[in-house]
Each structure stands twice: as C-alpha cells, then as structure tokens.
Image: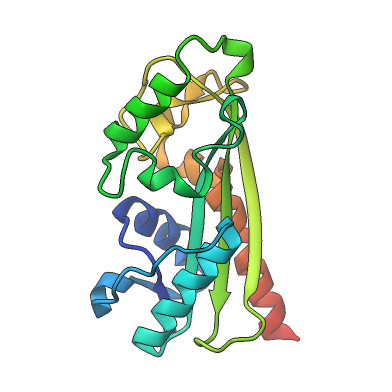
Amino acid sequence: MKRIVFASNNPGKVREVAHLLAPTGLEVVPQSEYLVPEAEETGLSFVENAILKARNACQHTGLPAIADDSGLEVDALQGEPGIYSARFAGPDASDADNNSLLLGELAGVPEPERSARYQCAMIFMRHAEDPMPLVCQASWEGRILEAPRGEGGFGYDPLFWLPDLACTVAELDADSKNRLSHRGHALRALVAALQERAES
C-alpha cells in the first residue's frame, strides 16, 4: 500500500480525507506521524497556501503529499475570513472563538444577506520540487445562522446552514458531509486526476 502524507494536523480533516481515500488503497498518514512542523501560510490564496503545505510535508518526509487549504467566504464581509478562517480570532483561536467573532461581525445583518460558501483547494505533489502539482478546487454554498446548531463537524459547521437540506453542516452525518462538502468534491476530483495520470 502506498503511503501519502496528508499535510494537516487537524484531526477532523485527517479523518475526512482518510475516509474518502480508503477505497483507493492509498494509506493516508497525518504529517504529525513524521513530526513535520507546520508550514508558514504566507500565500495570498487557498491554492498558494495548499502548495506551501504540500511542499513542506514532502521536504520533511520524502513522501508524496496531499494538502488542502480551505475556509469560509462570507459575502457581507467581502469574502472574510477567507484564507484566515482558522485564525480569524487570532493565531491560537478555537472554533468557538472564531464562531463567536463571526457572529459578532454579522450582528444586524439580515438573513437574506448572510450568504456564504466554503472553499477548498486540494493539492497533490509527488515530491518537494514537483513542477506540476495536481490542483483541484471546489466550493459549497450556504448561509450563516445567527446561532450555532448541531454537534458534528468542526470549524464553522454549526453556523453553516444548507437551505436545500434545512440543516447545518454540523447536523449532517459524516457520510453525507463527505459526499456533499467542498473538501469531498475537491478530493474526489483529485483522486480522479491521480487515476488519470497513472493510466496515461
């Protein structure tokens, strides 16, 4: 079984990616297994930050790496928190801190104007100097509630309302989230691209 390092220490993301890649026969190991230090996310886009994270994991392990950079764009906040989603309330912010700040920023914004989307850039690099990383992107549309609902997921999931399903992401079961999410769509596109590359 081929090992691929997933360039994240976020246990929620690691579980999602390992679950989605299980049918491919690839063994996904978190970078923490190799004591890989966190990459500095100095990029100005999700794609740039994902490449930085994948390259960093390759350099420290010598293995192929998958990295994602994902976050929340809120239209009423001109796309914030965007690439700063995980550290919206500060470098050591918890999910609760970020959610609380987001609700504060949106105080008084009426429901029709609370449109938002999750964005994900998913990258695969064969090695640290790979000149042609595979890049796949996907988004997931929703709205931001005025109070959290649900116990599942992580990040902004308790506030991210899915109008078509009449629930938040935090109220979905794991299989449904993986099927519908921005990360799930981006990762399935990446798997398809990997299979196509292997066959060509």
Give the x, y percent position of residue 67. 48, 67
Residue at the spot 37% in from the left edge and 20% down from the top edge: 149
Q: How is the image coloured?
A: rainbow
Give the image location of residue 112, x and y in percent.
63, 13
Q: Name the quarter where the N terminus is drawn.
A: bottom left
Residue 154, given in percent of the width and then of the height, sits at: 35, 40
Q: Total marks drawn?
A: 0
Residue 1 vs 162, above or below: the answer is below
- Residue drawn 50% across and 61% down? 68
Q: Nearer the viewer, residue 100 or 13?
A: 100
Does residue 97 appear left or right of residue 149 in this picture?
A: left
Q: Is any part of residue 3 visible from this angle?
A: no
Q: Nearer the viewer, residue 83 or 157?
A: 83
Which quadrant of the rendered structure holds the C terminus?
A: bottom right
On screen, residue 64 versus residue 188, left or right, reads left
Res 148 seen here: yes
Relative height, residue 47 to residue 120 (above, below): below
Closest to the observer, 11 or 92: 92
Residue 160 percent location from the top left of the image: 48, 28
- When the figure is inspected, residue 121 is found, relative to residue 39, above or below; the finding is above
Q: Quadrant of residue 181?
A: top right
- Identified at 42% across, 27% down, the residue is 102
Occupied quadrant, residue 157:
top left
Nearer to me, 141 or 173? 141
| Residue at figure coordinates x 50%, y 50% from the top left | 83
Instruction: Please indicate whether residue 189 sits to the left or right of residue 67 in the image.
Output: right
**Extreme right residue here?**
200
